[in-house]
Amino acid sequence: MTDATLNTGGESPRSSLLTQDAHTKRRNRAETRFRAYGLAAILIGLFFLIVLAVSIIRSGTPAFTRTVVDVEFTLTQTQIDEAESQLFKTAAYSGYFIDALKRQLDERGMDVAFDEDAIERIVGKPGSTIREYYRASPDRAGTPVAFELAASSRVDGYFNGRVTRDTIQDSRFLMEADLDLVDALAEAGIIRSSINWTFITGADSGVDNPGAAGIGASVVGSFFMMLVVLALSLPIGVAASIYLEEFAPQNRFTDLIEVNISNLAAVPSIVFGILGLAVFIQFAHLPQSAPLVGGLVLTLMTLPTIIISTRASLRAVPPSIRDAALGVGASKMQSVFHHVLPLAMPGILTGTIIGLAQALGETAPLLLIGMVGFVARGYPDGLAAGFMDPNSAMPAQIYTWAARADASFYEKAWGGIIVLLVFLLTMNILAIILRRRFERRW
Amino acid sequence: MPLLWLIVIVLAIAAGGYFMGRSRALAGAGGDSRSLHSLPSYYGYNVALKVLLPSFLLLLVWLMVQPVIVNGTVSSAIPERAIPEGSSRDLIMSEVRRTAEGLDNAVAQGVMTEEFARNARSDFNDVTQRLKDAGQIVTARVTQPILQAAQKFRVMNATGSLLMTVAVLAVAIAGAFWGLREMFPAFRARNVVERVVLGILVSAASVAILTTIGIVLSLVFNTIEFFRLYPASEFFFGTSWAPSFTGRGGASDLGVLPLLWGTFYISIVALLVAVPIGLFAAIYLSEYATPRMRSFAKPMLEVLAGIPTIVYGLFALLTVGPLLMTVFGREGLGWMQAGTAVMTAGLVMGIMLIPFVSSLSDDIINAVPQAMRDGSYGLGATRSETVRQVVLPAALPGIVGAILLAASRAIGETMIVVLGAGAAARLSLNPFEAMTTVTAKIVSQLTGDADFASPEALVAFALGMTLFVITLGLNVFALYIVRKYREQYE
């Protein structure tokens, strides 16, 4: 250090704190820039969230509607007999259908030319549906019947904007010329959109029939899986947390458990799938694709999450509660089970619901134990079958649809995501309400 | 369902034991609960626990052991000549199980009598037909050895279940008597019950250890099996991944390097997206944002972490992939061949990791003592200078830990890469090419109908082992860094 003053001779800079020199200006600009970067980062994050939400809603909503063709017609017994006597019975019924369609267009004073092939491309093969109907209820002959026939998936796409006049390629599925007919029918109110209940309640369909695919069966599969997860992970998780938080002595064994829990929380989910495959299916011979096995795997996966949140809420109960209980003569066990646990319960439940929501969205381990979409062919009959019969789960079903590489199945996959997110949202809102309503600040 | 009934009966015995134990203890004390050692309900719990614990333990063990014994006995009873060329004992056994199940269902539907299902022998063609009539899925023709084995399987299972029911009920009743004999007033019921409950708590906590052991064992055994069929050096140092399809024969190239490269490349792209955005978001939230802004933006960003990965996978495949194609694809710059590529998966995975990086770094930045900031402001530094020169250096170890945790998450991520990254394994530097990862190949090798004994299926376990070791190493290292840093300021 020297005694030299800062002013080393020459001209002293004539500056004031109130006027900004170049250096200060640069520093202030850097400050503004830095702040802008931070704001931009948050905005980018929110932008991604919005893009995600918009693309889910825009691509998913068409899955909930389907295009139907309304035709009302009357078949007399003689017409039915005539059709049944022919070699191509369904073709005869198709003929009736086309006649009825023509009549309806005429009634509305519209004149559109069409042929049978075009109808087949639009409605599929209406003949068999009509024949089935009359065979099932022969007494309806002679009375007017309103039919609601599902239009083909391409027509569906035209209505949803997936197929447009510019993008359509003439194929045996749909020709550009057919769209004129579709427009005319739509104008006449014969083709219209209605809610697709099959999608909400149905089961998975074959690869070539996207129109009949539904998510209902896999919702049931997910439900049974969540029952298993809830029934196992809540008691085991709470018991483990109580031990670690209230009773565990400081020793090697406790450390080992702690290390294990924190590592399990970070093990990739697919490794739990491998565990499930090797232990539950190869070794224990539990049935493949069963919601029970899926539930067991997801239980092991959610346990660390539940244990961590349960311990946090046990820790939040102040020691004075325990001391008071011990002071009036309760045993350690009584003080925990009678006083600490009830007070920690809202926090525990919140953590459990969030853990369940995580498990509900998990896909990879389920694929390994065989819970892929196409096994979800129907509802399980009965409670035991619900746990043991092959089924799928919502995310696995969505994956199966996405892997089919077909635009109409993609639409189902987006629709499935909306259903999945509705469940997740409900669970999270429930958790927030629980927390708001019962959480106690000490 | 008899198992359910068995459980209900045991529970009923326990409930009965509870009330009897309670009232007997009270009666022994002459109705005055003050002269009992413990509260009356503890005497009841003592009986109930002595019913439940041994009987459920026995039930659990029996349920696990019986299938192993039955399978072993039946499988060894199948004569060697009954196993056709190209088949294996395991395949025959699964056929036996299917036939046995078919017989069970046929009996349940009333298509067959129990008598017939047990004794049908010479007329085995008839059995096949009748099973098919009952709507059961059976192989083309149930041969005599398989039918015999299936019948033996059924008989053994039936006897086993009967024995199990008897044994479990006997244990439950014995437990009840044992508990009820102890109902004298001086019996220290609370201490006994509490010791048992503590035991239950300890065993629940040990589930975590058991899970880890289960993971390690299932990976290790199958990996050893794999290395017996396929040389380890070729797995670890092979530069080509080309599994042959099962049944076609031919040698497969199962080198892990292209998969590891794909995994790391995608993770790096993801981190390049997530780290700057997440870190800047965390800095803004903790240093600049008003409390209102913070209470809105933080949960909003965390929503990104709560979205299931399958949603991100679909987003990559159907939204981001086509979007990148319009810019970099044939009509744009011509760098990209298809929508699935390293870039697609990496970008989407980066979005997923933003909240992960931002909340972890936020916590760490908040843990930096305010005194350090105040000192910096006092010297005339601006806020950004304080952040860059004081806060970030102080928080650096923690932030590195957070980034490592995010990296381990990226390496273990499955659904985004399965849907967004493509299926071709290649060693390339072009981020617009399709590549594949360790996790994606685990899924594809294990979801086909490959035979479990083939190297093509077993390689998935070796891949799982690799993944487990890498992520575990990253986690342990990251937690070590984070913990070491935290100690500094507490």
Image (cartoon, coloured by chain):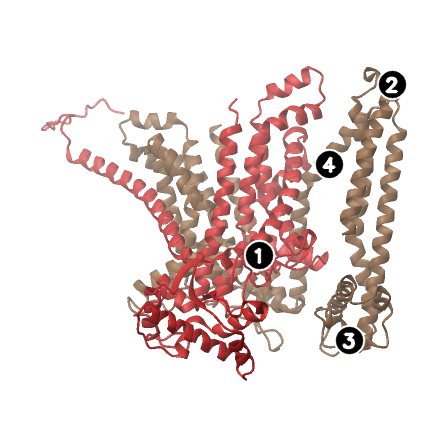
Contact flag, marks 1 and 3 (Cβ < 8 Å)? no
Going from the N terminus, do you reach mark 2 or mark 3 first? 2
For the residues marked 2 and 1, what is the alpha-carbon distance in whole angstroms? 58 Å
Amino acid beneath label 1: Ala
Res. A217 mark: 1
Q: CA distance from mark 2 to mark 3?
A: 70 Å
In contact (CB < 8 Å): disc 2 and disc 4: no
Q: Which residue is mark 2?
A: B29
Q: Nearer the viewer, mark 1 or mark 4?
A: 1
Find numbered disc 1 in the image and state the secondary structure of the residue it sits on.
helix
Q: Is residue A360 left or right of residue B361?
A: right
Which colour is chain B painted?
brown
Residue at mark 3: B83
Tell me the residue at 31%/40% (across/down).
Answer: A38
Q: Is residue B22 above or below residue A164?
A: above
Q: Which residue bears the numbered disc 4?
A: B200
N-terminal label among 3 and 4: 3
Question: Within 10 Å of the Cα at label 4, are there few (<14), some (14-19), or many (20+) other Cα atoms?
Answer: some
